[in-house]
Amino acid sequence: PTRMDVVELALHRPWSVHELRDALARTDSEFGFLLTIDDKVVVSHYSGGNGPLTRFRLFSSLSKPLTALAVLLLVQDGVVSPTTTLGDLGSAVARDATLWQLLTHTATVPDVTSDLYFRRTPLHRFRDVARWPACTPMPLDDFVADVATAERAAPAGGAAGVPRYNNTGYDLLGYAIYLATGVATDEFVRRRVLVPLEMHHTGFHNDGHPAE
C-alpha cells in the first residue's frame, strides 16, 4: 500500500494498533508517522531514510496554516488589521486585496502560482524541490513582476468575497508579512512560532538560503 492508501483506509473504519503498524511496515512511501495517546508514543514509523531527527519541511500547502498564523500574530500585535490592504503596506500589486480576503481565498487576484508555475513545471522538478534542503527560492522581485504581468494581462474574474481557492493569495500574505515587518516569512515563523514551540526540526523548504 502507499501512504495515501493507509490514510484512505483509516478514514473508513477503526484500526487496531497492530493493523496500523503492519500497514505502515508495508508502505512504499518516504515519510514519518507518529501516533501518541495521552502523551505516550504508541506508533513510531520512519521510512525512506527518515528518522526521529529528520527535519520536516513546510512545503506547498503545509505552509498555509503557519502563514495564516503569522498574519494573525501581526493582527494581535496591532501591526496590521484584517482590513489592511496590500496597498496600505506599500505593495504595487493586488493593492485592493485585504489580508482577510487573502486569508479566506476571497480576494480577486490572479493565481499565478497555479497557472504559471505549477502547470508549466514538470512534476519531477517539484519532486526535486521537495527534497530537503536543495531548493533555491524565487527572488521576490520576480514573483511581484509575475503578479503584475498577470494583473495587466488577465485580471482575476469573480467578485470580491466569493471563495475561490488561490495559492497566490497565500504567497501575497507572505509578501505582506515582509512588507509589514521587514522580515522574511520563513524567519518570522521560525522566531514567533517554531522556536517558542521548540519545533527545532521543522522549517520551510528554503531554509539555509539567504532570505529574498
Image: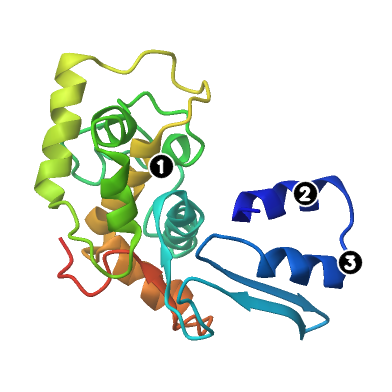
Residue named by callout 1: 99
How far apart, in angstroms, are the residues tagged by discs 2 and 3? 12 Å
Determine the secondary structure under disc 2.
helix
Q: Secondary structure at mark 3?
A: loop
Name the mark on residue 9: 2
| Residues at discs 2 and 3 in contact (Cβ within 8 Å) | no
The residue at the point 40 percent across, 57 percent down is: 59
Q: Is residue 160 above or below residue 172?
A: above
Question: Earlier along the polypeptide chain: callout 2 or callout 1?
Answer: 2
Instruction: Nearest to the eye among marks 2 and 1: give it.
Output: 2
Is residue 170 in view from this perspective?
yes
Label 1: how many residues lie within 10 Å, few (<14), some (14-19) or many (20+)? many
Which x, y percent locates residue 191? 38, 77
Residue pointed to by mark 3? 16
| Vertical comparison of 183 with 14: above or below | below
Indicate the quadrant containing the C terminus: top left, top right, bottom left or bottom right.
bottom left
Circle nearer the N terminus (1, 3): 3
Q: CA distance from mark 1 to mark 3?
A: 44 Å
Q: Residues within 10 Å of mark 2 (few under 14, many from 20)?
A: few
Q: Position of residue 113 (x, y in %)?
A: 30, 36
Q: Give the quarter of the image for residue 129.
A: bottom left
